[in-house]
Image (spheres, rainbow, N blue to C red):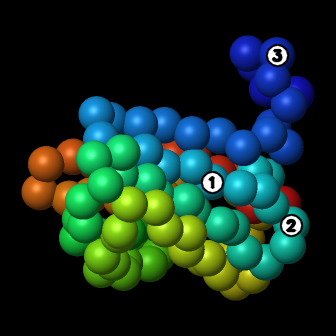
Amino acid sequence: IGASGTNLEEETAISDENVSMSVFPNPSALGYINVNISNSAGVRTEGLIEVIDITGRILNTERVAVEANQQLQIETSNMPSGMYTVSYTTNQTRVTERFMVK
């Protein structure tokens, strides 16, 4: 259970104007996480996905084009247990979400 009293198994989401991102399962012991990126304006956006460890080191970078709603799967099997962040950055916005690997 998280500090806010919510169960960490629940899907977490953060948004900035038209773009929102959710990460699940969180925490993950499955060897991957799903990242759902939505654009409420319904327009295609191009951006950069970055996975960063707790020290700030970039572990993975991938350029993606997102339609109105897209789900990506990021492999975590080679990551040690711990806290990480995943970010989606476009020219207009950046959304970031934390996730935990068990």
Secondary element type, mark 1: strand
Quarter of the view holding residue 50: bottom left
- Image point 44% across, 53% down: which residue? 38
**Residue at 85 percent of width and 73 percent of height:** 30
For disc 2, the marked residue is 29
Distance from disc 1 to disc 2, alpha carbons, whole Å, reads 13 Å
* Residue 30 left/right relative to 38: right
Badge nearest the viewer, 1 or 2:
1
Q: Nearer the viewer, residue 66 or 30?
A: 66
Mark 2 surroundings: few (<14), some (14-19) or many (≥20) residues within 10 A: some
Q: Residue 12 location in percent, x, y? A: 65, 40
Identified by mark 3, the residue type is Gly
Q: Is residue 46 visible?
A: yes
Q: Residue at x 49, y 68 (%)?
A: 70
Does the CB distance between marks 3 and 2 fall below 8 Å?
Answer: no
Q: CA distance from mark 3 to mark 2?
A: 21 Å
Note whether 21 is above or below 88 in the view shown.
above
Q: Circle 3 sits in a helix, a strand or a loop, which is it?
A: loop
Instruction: Pick the quarter of the image with the N terminus.
Output: top right
Residue at the farthest front position: 42
Which amino acid, by three-letter code, is at mark 2?
Ala
The residue that mark 3 highlights is 5
- Compare marks 3 and 2 and give the one earlier in the sequence: 3
91 on left or right of 75: left
Q: What residue would you read off at disc 1? A: 23
* Precedes in sequence: disc 3 or disc 1: 3
Return the x and y of residue 73 as percentages of the image width and height: 61, 76
Residue farthest toward the left in the current orientation of the protein: 91
Dot 2 lies on which element?
loop
